[in-house]
Image (tube, rainbow, N blue to C red):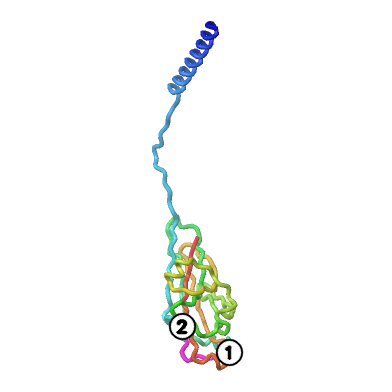
Amino acid sequence: MRSGYKITLGILTIMILVTITIGTSYSYYSVASEQTDPNEITTTCFDVSFTEGPNGSIKLNATYPMSETSANNLTPYEFTITNTCTTSNATDPIKYVVTLNTLTADVPTLPLNLLRVRLDKTSPSTQNGTSALLSNIAPYTLGDQLKTEEGIDTSYNLLEGTLAPGESVTYNLRLWIDETAGNDVMNDTFTGRVLIYSYM
């Protein structure tokens, strides 16, 4: 019994000595390197400007139901969207959504199924949009915080597009009362706001 104890103690002692020798040898022969240059992370530029045309907002004073041909004579609301990023790291295009929004402070009394909308591109190339009743345009989901900050009730998606760094695009927005409207729309009002939502 005593000799078995000595054998076990001898084996444990040898194992401890081998473990210490291997650990010491590894730490003695291991090599550590250190980084000399700093790590760099560069973000891309993300900035869009929105400029209104000289005519300011749309004013439909004493308006009446009309055809699209007659609506072509209306003075449009003109605005320009510009991707102002031109730095060397700005290579990705910026996506944007043009929305027409009803406001919580001025709820429209004009039925939206009688309000016709058309968005035409005028620059850098000309492209006429298709008119549609506002009630038939798909809503756009804005974040609740943005809706609250801007006083928006409902947002309607007029157009989606992309702008490369340094590019601009100009649009004309026309609103008019559809020609099918009757006398029951007299004295009704519509107040709205264009909002450009941009993202990458």
Residue 58 placement (x, y as % from top left)? 46, 83
Magenta stretch, main secondary structure, is loop
Label 2 vs 1, first from the N-terminus: 2
Task: Report helix, strand or loop for mark 2.
Answer: loop
Q: Within 10 Å of the Cα at label 1, are there few (<14), some (14-19), or many (20+) other Cα atoms? A: some
Q: Is residue 181 above or below residue 131?
A: below
Q: Which mark is residue 123?
A: none
Task: Give the residue pinned by disc 1.
Answer: 181
Residue 59 placement (x, y as % from top left)? 45, 85
Q: Are marks 2 and 1 in contact (CB under 8 Å)?
A: no
Q: Is residue 64 covered in magenta?
A: yes
Task: Give the residue pinned by disc 2.
Answer: 58
Q: CA distance from mark 2 to mark 1?
A: 20 Å
- In the rendered structure, which amino acid carries the disc numbered 1? Ala
Task: Report helix, strand or loop for mark 1.
Answer: loop
In this rendering, the label closer to the viewer, 2 or 1: 1
Residue 107 placement (x, y as % from top left)? 48, 81
Foreground of the two, 168 or 79: 79
Quadrant of the rendering where the N terminus is positioned: top right
Q: Residue furthest bottom?
A: 183
Residue positioned 48% across, 16% down in the render:
16
Q: Which residues are magenta?
A: 60-66
Foreground of the two, 170 or 63: 63
